[in-house]
Image: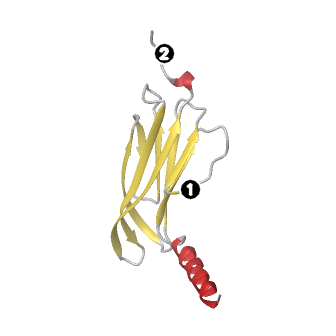
């Protein structure tokens, strides 16, 4: 029994420590309900013909700047720069009914002058209302 309690305590400590590790979160914009950032993956149905995905990099260390790498299945505008935030806004032109956007932090520069190459990513997937899909006969 003592070993079980110790093992459970160690697993709990390991899990709580991993929640503080650096990661990318995402959230779908243009939804009928309020969304919250979630770690590594987000998904939702949208009610907008021009939905978007917001990404943010979270670290337990103070960040000076980050380098983003990103892609999306539909066309749109990316606004990332070197801050901890990156957004994709779809332009609403044709595209897929079920769409996705992916953003990764590939390099982090911390305020103490140290840096790391990384691959912290989040993947957002959303579906658009049928009314936003062009109709063709």
- In this view, the residue farthest toward the front is 1
**Residue density around tag 1, few if under 14, some if 14–19, many if 20 or more, within 10 Å:** some
In the image, residue 36 sits, relative to residue 46, either above or below, namely below
- In this view, the residue farthest toward the bottom is 2
- In this view, the residue farthest toward the top is 137
Residue appearing at x 44%, y 59% in the figure: 83
Q: What number is the disc on residue 135?
A: 2
Where's the N terminus, which quadrant?
bottom right
Q: What number is the disc on residue 24?
A: none
Residue appearing at x 52%, y 39% in the figure: 126
Secondary structure at numbered mark 2: loop
Residue 11, horizontal then vertical, whole percent = 56, 78
Mark toward the start of the polypeptide (2 vs 1):
1
Secondary structure at numbered mark 1: strand
Image position of 34 (left or right of 129): right
Find disc 1 in the rendering and name its residue: 38
Its colouring scheme is secondary structure
Residue appearing at x 44%, y 26% in the figure: 93
């Amino acid at each position: 029994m003592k070993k079980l309690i110790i093992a459970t305590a160690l697993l709990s400590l390991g899990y709580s420590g991993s929640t503080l590790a650096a990661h990318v979160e995402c959230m779908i914009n243009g939804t009928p309900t309020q969304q919250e950032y979630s770690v590594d993956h987000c998904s939702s149905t949208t009610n907008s013909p021009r939905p978007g995905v917001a990404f943010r990099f979270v670290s337990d260390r103070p960040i000076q700047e980050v380098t983003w790498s990103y892609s999306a299945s539909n066309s749109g505008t990316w606004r990332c720069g070197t801050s901890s935030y990156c957004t994709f806004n779809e332009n609403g032109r044709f595209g897929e009914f079920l769409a996705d956007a992916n953003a990764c932090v590939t390099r982090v520069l911390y305020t103490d002058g140290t840096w790391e190459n990384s691959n912290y990513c989040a993947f957002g997937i959303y579906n658009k209302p049928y009314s936003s899909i062009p109709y063709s006969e």
